[in-house]
Image (cartoon, rainbow, N blue to C red):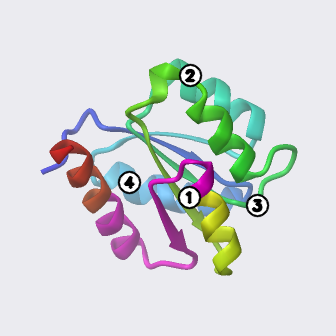
Amino acid sequence: MVDNKFKILLIDSDKEQLASIESALTAENFIVFSTSNSKDAIRIALEEQPHLVLLDLVMPELDGIDICIELRKHIQLNGTLVVFYSQRDEDYSQIAAFNAGADDYIVKPAKPRVLISRLKSSIKALHYC
């Protein structure tokens, strides 16, 4: 069971994608923050301290790898899960994400119910650690 105070930060340059995922997660009683701006993403993460960050790899300004590395530098975000959600399905992209500190990597497109199930699975794993 997911705590209804569980906070998720969505970071994606595609605003339609953001709106769609935000709607699906809100319907599941998550508290959702979203941004399509790389620099805002880091600021929001530090202010809101989400439990999970869902992050696209391809972003303007800072890419997802750089954002993940920056998030991992902040001690107050040590318990935050970082899950990449990207169309890039090459091995090297996924390896780079994990080397940067990712907890999981989901390849787009994923049906909303599948995406939410994967996120809930990651959340469960967090609670058992």
Q: Distance from label 1 to label 4 (Cα)?
A: 24 Å
Of badges 2 and 1, the one in the foreground is 1
Q: Residue 97: where, in percent of width, then height?
A: 62, 59
* Residue 103 drawn in magenta: yes
Are the two marked residues, 1 and 4, in contact with CB atoms closer than 8 angstroms? no
Of badges 4 and 2, the one in the foreground is 2
Q: Dot 3: few (<14), some (14–19), or many (≥20) neighbours within 10 Å?
A: some
Q: Secondary structure at mark 4?
A: helix
Tell me which residue sits at (56%, 64%) in the image. 85
Residue linked to disc 4 = 25
Upstream in sequence: badge 4 or badge 2:
4
Residue linked to disc 3 = 58
Q: Distance from label 4 to label 2 (Cα)?
A: 21 Å
Q: Distance from label 2 to label 3 (Cα)?
A: 21 Å
Q: Look at label 4 and name its amino acid.
A: Leu
* Residue 115 drawn in magenta: yes
Q: Residue 61: where, in percent of width, then height?
A: 87, 44
Residue linked to disc 1 = 98
Residue linked to disc 2 = 46
Q: Dot 1: few (<14), some (14–19), or many (≥20) neighbours within 10 Å?
A: some
Are the two marked residues, 2 and 1, in contact with CB atoms closer than 8 angstroms? no
Q: Secondary structure at mark 1?
A: helix
Q: Distance from label 3 to label 1 (Cα)?
A: 15 Å
Of badges 1 and 4, the one in the foreground is 1
